[in-house]
Image (cartoon, grey):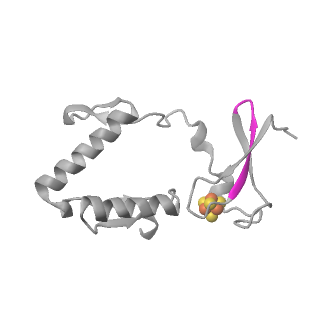
Amino acid sequence: MLQADQVVPTTCPYCGVGCQIDLHIKDGMIFRVNGRFDNHVNHGNLCVKGRFGYDYVHAPDRLRQPLIRANRSDELAPTDWDIALNTVANRLRHARDTYGPDSIAILTSAKCTNEENYLLQKLTRAILGTNSVDHCARL
Ligand code: SF4
């Protein structure tokens, strides 16, 4: 049986339930995931996504840095996080100020924690000024 070089305890990245998992790693590759029994979230259980959905970690086409569409062209170019976040903030501000708050809608993610989703609805309602906020789990 394949023996792990390293077993890394972490939290499943797929949804806000936050199941606790161990990643079994050999030669830098995840080859097995198991649910941890030492917690009150999942008691060792995992759904199919949490148990088997890790091929994206090693996918060659995985995004590893932000991309930006410079000058509104079709070409995406790599950039750093400061530029990417400033660009998003400036474009949201421009849309709100030019077209009104209801020109913007925010779609949050089941991969975010409850706290992150709370912050996104606060940003949407209190900063952007619209109630157009939804969550992908309702689709
Ligand atoms: S194992 Fe399934 S239920 Fe648990 S956090 Fe991951 S996706 Fe959510």
Q: Is residue 22 magenta?
A: yes
Of 139 and 107, which appears nearest the observer?
Answer: 107
Residue 54: x and y in percent read 63, 46
Residue 28: x and y in percent read 70, 31
Name the dominant secondary structure of the magenta segment.
strand
Q: Is residue 3 magenta?
A: no
Range of the magenta residues?
Answer: 20-28
* Quadrant where the C terminus is found in the figure: bottom left
Which residue is pictured at 50% across the width and 57% down the height? 112
Horizontal arrangement in the rendering, residue 129 relative to residue 109 (left or right)? left
| Extreme residue in the front direction | 126
| Extreme residue in the right direction | 1
26 is higher (above) or lower (below) than 119: above
Please state the total of marks drawn on the protein image. Answer: 0
39 is higher (above) or lower (below) than 80: below
Residue 38 falls in image quadrant: bottom right
Residue 99 falls in image quadrant: bottom left
Residue 26: x and y in percent read 76, 34
* Quadrant where the N terminus is found in the figure: top right
Residue 50: x and y in percent read 65, 56
Horizontal arrangement in the rendering, residue 76 relative to residue 114 (left or right)? left
Of 59 and 125, which appears nearest the observer?
Answer: 125
Which residue is pictured at 75% across the width and 63% down the height? 39
68 is higher (above) or lower (below) than 137: above
Residue 97 falls in image quadrant: bottom left
79 is higher (above) or lower (below) than 46: above
Horizontal arrangement in the rendering, residue 3 relative to residue 32 (left or right)? right
Which residue is pictured at 17% across the width and 48% down the height? 94
Of 3 and 127, which appears nearest the observer?
Answer: 127
Which quarter holds ligand 1?
bottom right
